[in-house]
Image (cartoon, helix red, strand yellow):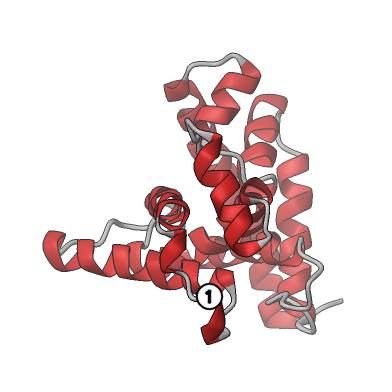
Amino acid sequence: MSMNSNRHENHFYEKTGINFQKFYKEFKSRLSWYLARYTKSFEIAEDWADEAFIQALLKIDTYDTNKGAQIHTWLYTIAENLVKNDYKIQQRLPSLSLDKEITENFKLINCISYNDGEREAQGNVELETKVQIIKSTIHGLPDKYRKVLVMRELENMSYSSISDDLGINLSTIKSQIKKGRKLVRQKVQSKFKNIEENGII
């Protein structure tokens, strides 16, 4: 997400004492996963998350610090309202790009990367094992798929940022990520089934 002026960011800091760019980096991915429950598509959820951050930046004067609500809670409310209002108008839900099992475990990869006591995978050995399987599978892919999936799924980079960093056109990046995800799904399914049938060995 790009902001054309520092004026709003400075005002955001004056109002909250929080650096907006750091706030964005900390909560962008978590907010996107939260919104994905409505959109059923992480890509669309990311777009709505960006819009919510923009709205929060522009409307920071409406944030009432006296009510005691944390700034990220206020942000989530803005985002949820944006998505729900759009859904009422559009009356559609996009299909998932991955099957539920893989999608949920990609979510866990994101969650366990935070050290704030809110890790969704904490204490669940089976799910953490599946996360590690996905991570190792990604790192074992052919180079062209490994690079883009690490950047997309583990580092939470946008498609456009990946394209810029690697100097590869956007359509190729999307194609490589799609094929890489398919390879991951094929490689982990039998391992997941073995865990579910035989437990952690």
Asked whether, in this view, residue 75 is left or right of residue 80, the answer is right
Q: Is residue 23 above or below residue 83?
A: above
Front residue of this view, candidates 39 and 146: 39
Give the percent coordinates (x, y) of residue 123: 79, 84
Asked whether, in this view, residue 194 is left or right of residue 80, the answer is right
Q: Is residue 35 above or below residue 173?
A: below
Front residue of this view, candidates 118 and 95: 118
Give the percent coordinates (x, y) of residue 165: 64, 21
Q: Is residue 82 above or below residue 21?
A: below
Mark 1 residue crowding within 10 angstroms, few (<14) / some (14–19) / many (20+): few
Picture residue at 34% right of the left edge, 62% below the top = 39
Residue located beneath label 1 in the image: 73
Picture residue at 37% right of the left edge, 51% below the top = 44
Give the percent coordinates (x, y) of residue 196: 67, 79
The part of the image, by quadrant, that contains residue 89 is bottom left
Q: Is residue 109 above or below residue 182?
A: below
Q: Amino acid at mark 1?
A: Thr
Picture residue at 63% right of the left edge, 33% below the top = 148
Picture residue at 67% right of the left edge, 51% below the top = 19
Check disc 1 and report its element: helix, strand or loop. Answer: helix
Q: Quadrant of the C terminus?
A: bottom right
Front residue of this view, candidates 70 and 52: 70
